[in-house]
Amino acid sequence: LKGVAKAGKTGPILGWDDVGGLQEVCRVIRELLELPVRYPKLFASAPLRLRTGVLLYGPPGCGKTHVVAAAAAACSLRFIPVKGPELLDKYIGASEKAVRDVFARAAAAAPCILFFDEFDAIAPKRGHDNTGVTDRVVNQLLAELDGVSALTGVFTFAATNRPDLIDAALLRPGRLDHLLFCDFPSQAERLDILRVLSRHLSMEDDIDLQYLSRFSEGFSGADLKAVLSDAELEAVHSAIERPREKHNQRPVITMEMLKSALARAIP
Ligand code: ATP
């Protein structure tokens, strides 16, 4: 469903071009999703179970959710995002049922990507929860993950900031066995992200994105997006100052606005 997932003010997510940096992560996901579609007969006759599960991990705001939404758009797969904590239900049995229901929904929507965000909330190591709720949820997840594959058209992705908390059985071969690290972007990656995120913004011609990428060490993609949004807001404010007859002109971001947004930003 191209363009269904929205990326806020930066426009709809349409495909791989909407991802800055994260080249290796994109390459692995692309291979995983595109090869079975391109060579269905070969894959259907493959004797081994196809590996279709991915766990993305890394610091907040570094594009884990974004890259999966882009992958879904690029491969024309439905995107079913599920927030881990929302699946947890204190009533006995209800959380497992919620997990079963989500997988049933995904099977009905195939071909699709089922994406669990904040996965650590529903998939912690078993044996540490007095109520037993999360242990049962993990058992249910294990059962469901064993039932999906590229052949059923359900690709399961999960994301977490804390891979160390996740029950190891979920990461065994045949389950979420591709582990992909989404790290803070390097300078070149920051430049790439800034280019992607600023494509739809109205900016003056002399904007120096190189400068921004150089002086934003330690910023995540989400932090860079916040800098651009902050500058955009300033552009709107300065447009408000114009005489009323000029209010129909689109607010334009200047380099000064970007520099002061960057100086204000706390990554
Ligand atoms: P969390 O761990 O908090 O869920 P996350 O790693 O899933 O964070 P996202 O939600 O994917 O982070 O990123 C937040 C926003 O930052 C995205 O909607 C996107 O606009 C922007 N962003 C982050 N990384 C990138 C990137 N590599 N390319 C383009 N945009 C990015």
Image (tube, helix red, strand yellow):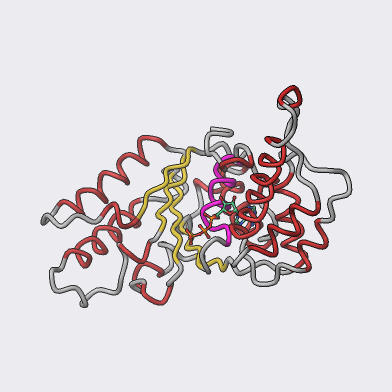
- Residue lying at 22% horizontally and 65% vertically, measured from the top left: 134
Q: Is residue 87 left or right of residue 46?
A: left
- Residue lying at 63% horizontally and 63% vertically, measured from the top left: 265
Measured as percent of width and height from the top left, residue 245 is found at: 74, 22
- Give the overall secondary structure of the magenta segment: helix
Is the residue 192 above or below the residue 244 in the image? Answer: below
Measured as percent of width and height from the top left, residue 140 is found at: 24, 58
Determine if the magenta segment contains residue 72: yes
- Residue lying at 71% horizontally and 37% vertically, measured from the top left: 241
In this view of the protein, which residue sits in the foreground, 86 or 146? 86
Measured as percent of width and height from the top left, residue 180 is found at: 55, 66
- Residue lying at 27% horizontally and 52% vertically, measured from the top left: 87
Is the residue 96 above or below the residue 75 in the image? Answer: below
In this view of the protein, which residue sits in the foreground, 98 or 112? 98
Residue lying at the far left of the rendered structure: 92
Q: Residue 186 sits in which quadrant? A: bottom right
| The residue stretch that appears in magenta | 62-74
In this view of the protein, which residue sits in the foreground, 199 or 169? 199
In this view of the protein, which residue sits in the foreground, 135 or 169? 135
Residue lying at the far right of the rendered structure: 206
Q: Residue 240 sits in which quadrant? A: top right
Measured as percent of width and height from the top left, residue 82 is found at: 37, 49
Q: Is residue 236 left or right of residue 79?
A: right
Determine if the magenta segment contains residue 192: no
